[in-house]
Amino acid sequence: MAPRRISVSETSRPVLPRHARLKFDETRQRWVILAPERVLAPDEIAVEILQLCDGARDVAAIIDALAVRYTADRAEIGRDVVAMLQDLADKGFLTEARETTP
């Protein structure tokens, strides 16, 4: 089954699809997203955002956490986070978390 593409908003709960992993690459000495036949090397801020994309938090919670951590304007961070996550989703590196039933 192909990962579901998403339109990222503050209510989205993004997560890496099953075929992709965020991993620290010892050889490159940097974080990478590994996917079949593809490797993406996100910058430090993108890595921090991706580490918060656990499928439990929505984008609004991620933005709130970053705004507090960096004592920055929430609206500005929000625009940047949504744009970055949408770019990754468009490239197939993010999908929407599925609802789980207990």
Image (cartoon, helix red, strand yellow):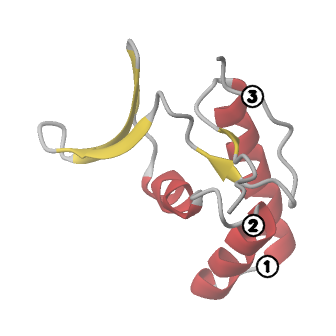
Distance of mark 3 from mark 2, alpha carbons? 25 Å
Contact (Cβ within 8 Å) of mark 3 with mark 2: no
Residue at 18% over, 38% down: 28
Q: Neighbour class for label 1 at 10 Å: few (<14), some, many (≥20)?
A: few
Say which element carries label 3: loop
Identify the element where label 1 is drawn: loop
Mark sitting on residue 4 = 3
- Asked where in the image residue 53 lies, by quadrant, the reply is bottom right
Task: Please name the amino acid that badge 1 sits on.
Answer: Asp
Provide residue 101's location: percent of width, then percent of height. 72, 57
| Above or below 79: residue 83 | above
| Marks 2 and 1, how far apart at CA | 6 Å
C-alpha distance separating marks 3 and 1: 31 Å
Mark 3, Cα crowd under 10 Å, few <14 / some 14-19 / many 20+, is some
Instruction: Please identify, in this view, whether the residue under mark 3 or under mark 1 is nearer the observer.
Output: 3
Does residue 92 lie above or below 55 as drawn?
above
Please identify the quarter of the rendering in which residue 83 is found: top right
Identify the residue at horizontal 66%, vertical 18% (top origin): 2
Of the pair 90 and 19, the residue shown nearer to us:
19
Residue in the picture at 63% in, 37% down: 94
Residue 73: which disc?
A: 1
Query: Can you name the residue that lies furthest to the left here?
Result: 27
| Residue type beneath disc 3 | Arg
Q: What's the mark number on residue 35? A: none
Is 7 or 80 nearer to us in this picture?
A: 7
Image check: 56 left or right of 58? left
Q: Mark 2: few, some, or many residues within 10 Å (few <14, many ≥20)?
A: some
Rendered image: mark on residue 77:
2
In the rendered image, residue 87, in percent from the top left (x then y), is placed at: 70, 34
Q: Mark 2 touching mark 1, by CB under 8 A?
A: yes
**Most extreme residue toward the top, as rendered?**
37
